[in-house]
Image (cartoon, helix red, strand yellow):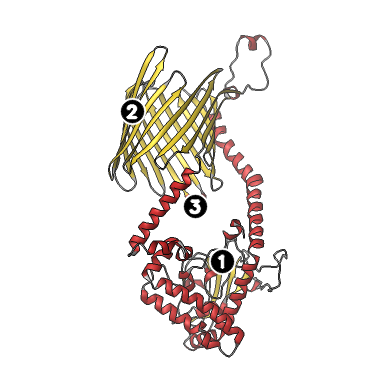
Amino acid sequence: MDEEGDSILLEDNYYQLLNISKTATPEEINSAYRRFSRIFHPDKHSTDPNKQKWAEQIFNKVKDAYEVLSDSHKRAIYDTLGKRGLEVEGWEIIFRTRTPREIREEYERLKREREERRLQQSANPRGTITLSINATDLFMKYYDEYDILEDAAIIPSIEVSGMTIQQSIDAPVTLRNTATLSGNISTQNGTGTGSLTISNRHLSSERGWTELECGIGNGPVFGFKIFRTISRLMFVNCWTGLQFTPRGIVPSFASTMALQLDAHSVGYLTYRAGGQSGSSMTSTYVRDSEKYHLNTAMQIGNPHSFISFNVMRKLPQHDLKLRLALKFGTFGAIAEYGAEKKVSQNSSVSAAVMLGIPSGVMLKLKWSCSSQTIVVPIHLCEEVIPSPVFYATVVPMISWLVLKKLVLDPIARERQQRERQRSMEANFERLQEMQRQARATVELMRETYTRIRSDEEKKKGLVIIKALYGKLPTGASDHEIPIEQSGDTASPESPNAYSEVIDVTIPVQCLTKDSRLELLEASKYELPGFYDPCAGDEKHLTIQYMFHNNLHCCTVEDNQSVILPRNNHRIKNRS
């Protein structure tokens, strides 16, 4: 099987198999094990050899789960590494440790060593391309003498005013030394410059590192940087350099001290002196929480001083970030607003409108894919007037909606369908085995199901009328949902090889205890008697049930918890 096919079929979840939480006590684990033992013990099905064979297989899975979760050492390994850790690496760890805490610490150490070995074998390329466009002729035409004497051009003049290409590559030399090669080529209004820098970072200890760099560009440059952790909440880094120019040697110095103020806030104090940018002192406050990112700064220096405020609202449910920034200083004032949208696992797009005095109106587009970034700042107008502000705000929004609707969404749907089909084909035999095991489990549960249902009916308790699991049609009522079962001889190429909805009435009723049903906040397909009928797609669980002679209905998402009875799901009363 290929890796892509394996990704949608996870290994056995011991907690879900026993229908207990990850914080379950030993008593809860024992109770769950005894409960399922009464259902699946092979001796209870000795009259039917076929049932006894399936009972032995399912009982062994339940027994394996119990043996792991009831042992503190094995449970700690399983919680940290999963089932595979118990088979190989977990036992390597347990021989050298004694407590669950030591097991986790040893695992983290081995994980860091694996990461270091991985870094030795790979580079980390990073690059940024900036393409500056001058489009001021769109909103404010500039007429010279030739335009006045001759007919002015009908088509506005849009030109590329500048371009910058930056690229760097890391090359791990040893576990403690990393070399970095970086280059920069820039052109602005026909004038170009470039530079090349090579540096070596040495990890001197767990508390700090040093870096030596040299480069060429506008004269040779030599620099030295040091980073040091002062305490658990504070660190300092310093940089000093010498640039050799035709006018002489230009020294420069920069130092930053950072202090962790609380769990979400960090304060920075930065001092710069020398170089072409002058001297300054900057104080910065950064607060990063689950919903907001706040950044405020104040700089006093020569030739520029400013105050800035930047706030970002995070909307993770929509993969969206909204940003607002203000900046005032000796150079003027700038207001900026924009949004960033995540379009895939490793790529995002963003658009921002900047209104400045005296810079005017600018639209900044940005696309990031992994470690590569493309930035396109478009200068629309040299003055802040309504028309460029309106178009800079509306046009990117409309363009994104059209692009998403006509291009991105169809591509995503096609890719998802292709990956699902490939996964189905790669895991066909395993899916068939899961289906057969689920159907055998249901047969083993029938006797228990009849007993529990009869007891619940006598005391007017929780009686499951119908339970459906899978890709339920949107807006369809329960009696309209087809329940299909694929045969053992189906092939993955067959359009009906896998049913998308299965009947789980018997397993759900068997999970009922004392007129109460509780399912954990996890995927349901690993519960006894369940299987995944539509791997890779969103699934729901719908349950119709009677409680105190009242008919109710409950529909939840696959990973949502279920606690029944719930009176607010009533759909009909019966006398």
Position of residue 85 relative to residue 109, above or below, is: below
Front-most of 300 and 215? Answer: 215
Please tell me which residue lies in front, 355 or 65. Answer: 65
Q: CA distance from mark 3 to mark 1?
A: 19 Å
Q: CA distance from mark 2 to mark 1?
A: 57 Å
| First in sequence: mark 3 vs mark 1 | 3
**Amino acid type of the residue tagged 2 in the rendering:** Ala
Label 2: element kind: strand
- Judge from the rendering whether residue 515 lies leftward or rightward of residue 430; answer left or right: left
Q: Residue at x 39, y 76 (%)?
A: 28
Q: Residues within 10 Å of mark 2 (few under 14, many from 20)?
A: some
In primary-sequence order, the first of circles 2 and 3 is: 2
Vertical position of residue 354 compared to residue 48: above or below? above
Disc 2 to disc 3, C-alpha distance? 40 Å
Residue 437, percent from left and from top: 59, 75
Secondary structure at numbered mark 1: strand
Task: Identify the residue at horizontal 54%, vertical 21% (top origin).
Answer: 187
The image position of residue 343, as x and y in percent, is 56, 46
Q: Amino acid at mark 1?
A: His
What crowding class fits label 3: few (fewer than 14 Cα within 10 Å), some (14-19), or many (20 or more)?
A: few
Residue 348 falls in image quadrant: top right
Question: Which residue has dot 1 on it?
Answer: 540
Label for residue 254?
2
Q: Position of residue 86 (x, y in %)?
A: 45, 66
- Mark 3, residue position: 317
